[in-house]
Every structure is written in structure tokens, then in C-alpha cells.
Image (cartoon, rainbow, N blue to C red):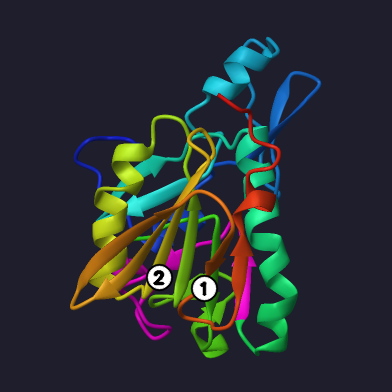
Amino acid sequence: MDYFAPDQRLTLADLIASPLGPYELIDGTPHPKYGGTPIQRPDGVRYTLDEFLALPENGYFELLRGKLRKLPRPTLTHMRVLQDLCYPLMDPLDRMGVYWLSFPVYVMPFATPETPYDEIDTVLEPDFYAIRDRSRVSDDGCFGPPELVVEILSPGAEDFDFGEKLDLYAAAGVQEYWIADPERRELTVCLLERGQYRRQVYRTGKVPVAVFPPLEADLDRAFRRCPHE
């Protein structure tokens, strides 16, 4: 199957069954990180790092109405902002009885646990989400919209995270959607009102988590390790 063919329509069942990444490079041969068959060249020539990073299979993926999208590789800054923004929320969420997960995770915002996998054609992979109803989460991901979704903006992904992905989260009913921009050192909080997001931008101080009061995030901590302009 050509997963990147323009006319190819995929589902969650296809995504789970696929040999798509992530991979590790061991002695010049890409090995699937979570088991599977290594990628071998017919002539046995080893892969270089540049070739390894360019592999279409190597990475994390989302399905957008049946179309496969490869996510940008998370940078060190990306992962630091994820840690500093979201990790302090984890223990308080636990105490509130709220279930959370951090990247890499699958969210099927328009599905239910009863939806057949071969009918699910939208699978998103946010950096963090939190949900009250633990029964909607399985080993394969979250079915239906979480109350809170957090995305850390990657270079070149701004139009997507503020465009198509924002529209999908709103249509699915995600009540609160955060987009953290490490380059601008700012957080855009989107709150759902009458099916549309009302946006507010924060740059410093504490930010309330509207869906889980009185929880707050500390932006001074979140962006402390980001490069300054």
C-alpha cells in the first residue's frame, strides 16, 4: 500500500496496521522502535543520518479525513516547552480525577469506543490532552473530544495548527485548545463558545485552565528555556 498516494484514503485500522515509524538507526539500519521488520536496502548499503531522517516512514503521523500527514520532528525546544508547560499540570490533574496523556498519543475526536476502526478517518496526535471520562481511552487512543488539548507549535506548522486542526477540534467539541509558540514565547488559549473558538494570547504569568479550575499554568516557567529574540 502506498500510504502517501494522493488518492489513498486511510482509516485508524490502516494506521495501526502500517509499518510507519518511529524508527531507530542501529548500525546503519532503521529498526521500528516498537517492534517489526528493519528497513533493509537490497544492496545492504547502510543509511546515513540525513537519509534516515528523510525516510517517509520515519516519524509520527495524523489522519485528516483519510489523508496521511507526517508531523514535523519535535525539536529540543519543542520538548522542553511541553515539559515545562504541561508536566506541572499532571499531579494536580491526577488529584482531580482527570485522565491525561502526553505525546505521542492518538485522539479520534469524532469517534466513540464503539466506532469500527475501519470507519475512523480522522486521527490527531496532540502533544498533551486531558479528559474526565477515562472510559473513552484505550491502548489505541482517545475516542471523542478531550476537554483540554495542547499543541506545541513546530516550525512550519502554524497555518495548520491555527487553521485546519483548530477547525477540527472546534467541530469535534474540544472545549479548550492551547497552542504554545516557543519562538514568540506566547500561548494562545482557544475557548469554545457556540461552536467557535474565542482566542486570548498570553505571554507571561499564570494562565487559568478554564475547563479544570482552579488549575493554572505558569508561562514564565513554560518558556524559561526558549531562545530569546
* Residue 154 located left or right of residue 37: left
Q: Residue at x 35, y 59 (%)?
A: 200
Q: Nearer the viewer, mark 2 or mark 1?
A: 1
Judging by the rendered image, the residue that carries numbered circle 1 is 209
Q: Residue at x 55, y 74 (%)?
A: 130
CB within 8 Å, label 2 to label 1: yes
User: Around disc 2, counting alpha carbons within 10 Å, would you say few (fewer than 14), some (14 to 19), or many (20 or more)?
Assistant: many
Judging by the rendered image, the residue that carries numbered circle 2 is 176
Residue 193, picture quadrant: bottom left
Q: Which residue reaches farthest front?
A: 205
Mark yes or no: residue 41 visible. no
Quarter holding the N terminus is: top left
Front one among 217 and 154: 217
Q: Position of residue 180 (x, y in %)?
A: 49, 49
Quarter holding the C terminus is: top right
Above or below, comparing residue 121 to residue 24 in the picture = below
Q: How many marks?
A: 2
Q: Residue at x 70, y 71 (%)?
A: 90
Q: Position of residue 85 (x, y in %)?
A: 63, 56
- Tell me if residue 108 is in the magenta stretch: yes
The magenta segment: 99-120
Above or below, comparing residue 87 to residue 93 in the picture = above
Q: Amino acid at mark 1?
A: Val
Above or below, comparing residue 129 to residue 137 in the picture = above
Q: Earlier in the sequence, mark 2 or mark 1?
A: 2
* Residue 173 located left or right of residue 189: left
